[in-house]
Image (spheres, grey):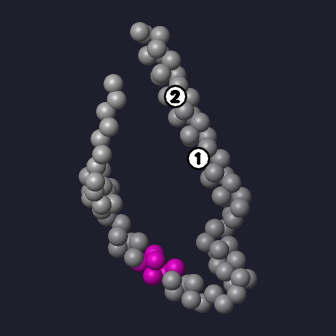
Amino acid sequence: MKVHVEIDCTPEEARAFMGLPDVGQANDVYVEMMTKAMKGVGSTEKLQEYANQLAPMGQVGMKLFQNFIEGAVKAQGAASGAAAGKSDKDK
């Protein structure tokens, strides 16, 4: 049996429904800080320097994070496949 539920709500309503915190003020502060920082960037070298300050590990850190996420997705898929295999055998 399949059940399809469609919910029409704003992102704020969805966060409140799921019990997630309201991060609107923190987001506003972050956007303002980034806007001020980007106004001071006059060249690509300055932008690269700023990006390196934000992400000290640069590409290596991004690759590690990507591998972590891919591993989690594969593990979830394997767990789902194993659960589906058990339910098929039970029938």
The N terminus appears in which quarter of the rendering?
top left
| Amino acid on which disc 2 is placed | Ala
User: Dot 2: few (<14), some (14–19), or many (≥20) neighbours within 10 Å?
Assistant: few
Helix, strand or loop: magenta stretch: helix
On screen, residue 35 versus residue 59, left or right, reads left
Instruction: Using the rendered image of the protein, determine whether residue 19 is visible from the camera's viewpoint.
Output: no
Q: Which of marks 1 and 2 is nearer the N terminus?
A: 1
Q: Please state the extent of the stretch shown in magenta in the rendering.
A: 29-34
Residue 75 sits in which quadrant? Answer: top right
Question: In the image, residue 9 lies at what x, y percent?
Answer: 28, 57
Question: In the image, residue 54 lies at what x, y percent?
Answer: 61, 72
Residue 3 sits in which quadrant? Answer: top left
Question: In the image, residue 64 lies at what x, y percent?
Answer: 66, 52
Image: 42 above or below 81: below
| Contact, mark 1 vs mark 2 (Cβ under 8 Å) | no
User: Dot 1: few (<14), some (14–19), or many (≥20) neighbours within 10 Å?
Assistant: few
Residue visible at 69% across and 63% down? Answer: 57
Find residue 46 and name its label.
none
The C terminus appears in which quarter of the rendering?
top left
Find residue 79 and name its label.
2
Q: Give the SS element for disc 1.
A: helix
Residue visible at 71% across and 61% down? Answer: 59
Question: In the image, residue 19 lies at what x, y percent?
Answer: 28, 52
Residue visible at 39% across and 72% down? Answer: 26
Query: Disc 1 marks which residue?
Result: 69
| Amino acid on which disc 1 is placed | Ile
Q: Give the SS element for disc 2.
A: helix
Instruction: Using the rendered image of the protein, determine whether residue 16 is visible from the camera's viewpoint.
Output: yes
Label 1 vs label 2: CA separation? Answer: 15 Å
83 part of magenta stretch: no
The number of numbered badges drawn on the structure is 2
